Amino acid sequence: METMTTSIILPFLVFFPFLGAVISYIIGRSNKGARDIWCWILSAVIFIASLTLIGKETVYSLRGFCGLGLSFAADGFGVILAVLTGAIWLITTIFSKEYMAAERNRNRYYFFVFLTLGATMGIFLSADLFTTFIFFEIMSFTSFVLVMHDEEDFTVRSAKTYLAVAVIGGLVTLMGLFMMYQKAGTLNMAELTAFMQSRENPAEFYAIGVLILFGFAAKAGLFPLHTWLPNAYTVAPAPSSALLSCLLTKTGVFGTIIVSCKLFLHDAAWGQFILILGIITMVLGAVLAVFSVNLKRTLACSSMSQIGFIIIAIGMQGLLGEHNALAASGTLLHFLNHSLFKLLLFLGAGVIFMNLRELNLNKIRGYGKDKPLLKLIFLMPILGIGGIPLWNGYISKTLIHESMVEYIEVLKEAGQSIAFMKGAEILFLFSGGLTLAYMTKIFVCIFLEDNPYGAPKPVKNGPYISKLMAVILGAIAICLPILGIFPHQTQDALAAMGAHFMNAHTPAHAVHYFAWVNLKGAVISICVGIVVYFLFIRKVLMQKDANGNLVYVDRWPEWCNLEDKVYRPILLTVLPYVGGFFARIAGNLMDDIIALLRIFIFNNDNGRIVPPEDKYFSAYTDYENDHQVYREGFAQSILLIGLGLTIAVIYIIV
């Protein structure tokens, strides 16, 4: 790589989409077709600009902006993420034209799509955690509008949950950043790594680390902060769902990598903690996907599970310490591979929805039987995400699995217990089998089975997919086995580019991916998948309806819902009640103190106390017409507060 140089391309990739979003909205007010063309041009320009970063290490700083300034950097990993972001945004923007043709509020949609693009670039190209946080919060608010696009009741409810988790997570992360800055005097990632390595006892910073991790874990959909994910992915338009799964959720993974590989580098205890979070998320997401009977919800739960695989790889980096080459390569490659899988699968689901306006497996059953291209678009990522040898997902999953096997051998040599890690390995292989089972369910349902009530009838006239999108998605689908057949020439090279960011080195020797010792794990998962599909999905999750036809049923228990049974009651009922209770106690206590002072100090007991200024506050007045006085005063106060905050923000920025 070249020496670090200053490049205007970095702020261009971040801020030009913001300007482009405004221009698209202005154009769209008068000419929808011109707006669509501008959006294609804008996303193409961003993608081409990201390509100019390849082979370079660049930095750029905006000193004094927002107080601490904004810092950007692009090394190998940052370049990969910038190019990935530009490519996926271009493809989803092209698809949006045909998918959104029958939708309302398209101007608003494109406006927030490109605001989200700028924020996402800002996160992936950030050089310090302050910059990461600023754009992380912007992205949370702009993507909220993408989730609630159709404005139906359930959609708005799901979007509010998404926003609530994002805001709460952001506030907790901000608290952690305050504490870290107070301790280290910097939020620059490289400087934080040096600072933490100089500490004799990094365990003192675990509490701060958990606080910083909280917001990133919420965005990544890690258990127990995953509750927003299945519904948000399901209700969002298909292009937005693809962006959520391929990139926006990955910003949370990116933050987790920063905390684990920059702050707690080679920390075994922290790695164990991350590993446990990853295992729970991986297994739970896979189980939820097995039970789902909605295509996009299945893909959403699958995304949660695959994020768990990546988080396991991040945890293994901490456990393996300096010997983390396999885990680091597995982290980066599954990060990228999963984005390719879900780009194809969510856009494929979008093709089905825009033709049928349905996502229930029983209603879309058999739709793809006579559509070989759509079959290819689904089959390639299904084989990849299932970890089938000769597909790209097999390579990244093998690296993660082999890192676990390597650590088990380390524990054996040290004479320590391997029970926990063996259990983790079994769950890893079992979850791989579940992945294959629920993906098989999707493929068989759409492409192999007959619909007992007749072939689904499209509501859309003309070809089911445009020629341009057919070429794009078909080309990407063909790339997946190429990446799997030639891993050393393709995926290993990408892994080497991103190793430095995670403070890892490339493997000391080439991995023999197709040796039996590595194939064995895939074979075990395939066997598990076959058993689960035929003995559980076909026997338990299907039943005959009133007409004697075998249909898919959702047997997930309704009471097993963290959001409705735990989080909402606590946040909307328990906490307000507790807060109100203590507020009432505090208020009554002050009244009692004043009353006692009047009796025993001032010898004046004239009953109810009415301070002179209270005639302007309706809570204490006896006159109905004083309520209007209070409302007007309160409104003016709020207006002045808002004006003051605006002036303060402008002052800080300038």
Image (spheres, rainbow, N blue to C red):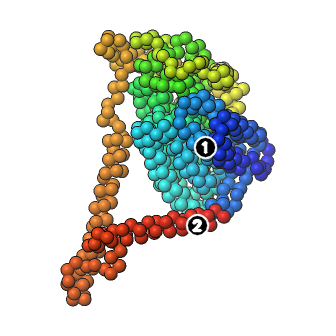
In the picture, the disc for residue 94 is: none
Q: x and y percent of residue 320 in the render?
A: 56, 40
Instruction: Tell me what residue is drawn at x 35 percent, y 46 percent.
Output: 568
Q: Is residue 461 left or right of residue 595?
A: right
User: Badge 1: how crowded within 10 Å, few (<14), some, or many (20+)?
Assistant: many
| Residue named by callout 2 | 647
Camera-nearest residue between 433 and 368: 368
Q: Residues within 10 Å of mark 2 (few under 14, many from 20)?
A: few
Across and down, in percent, residue 151 comes to 46, 40
Amino acid type at mark 2:
Ile
> How far across and how far down the image is residue 342, in percent?
56, 29
Which residue corresponds to the image point at 49% horizontal and 12% vertical from the top-left? 448
Residue topped by disc 1? 111
- Which amino acid lies under the numbered mark 1 shown in the image of this protein? Phe
Q: Earlier in the sequence, mark 2 or mark 1?
A: 1
Name above or below for residue 13 compared with residue 84: below
Name the one closer to the observer, 131 or 643. Answer: 643
Please report the residue visible at 72 percent of the width from the left and 26 percent of the height from the top.
489
Q: Position of residue 260 (x, y in %)?
A: 56, 46
Query: Relative to residue 596, is residue 467 drawn left or right?
Result: right
The reply, left or right, for residue 441 in relation to residue 54 is left
Residue at point 68%, 30% (across, down): 492
Using the image as rendered, state which of residue 50 and residue 117 is in the foreground.
117
Q: Out of 389 and 339, give the one closest to the viewer.
A: 339
The quarter of the rendered structure image containing the C terminus is bottom right
Instruction: Determine whether the residue tagged by mark 2 lies in a helix, strand or loop.
Output: helix
Res. 584 image quadrant: bottom left
In this picture, is 121 found above or below 546?
A: below
Task: Give the quarter of the image for residue 335.
Answer: top right
Gap in Å between the C-alphas at discs 2 and 1?
Answer: 26 Å
Left or right, 283 with reference to 216: left
Describe the element under mark 1 as helix, strand or loop: helix
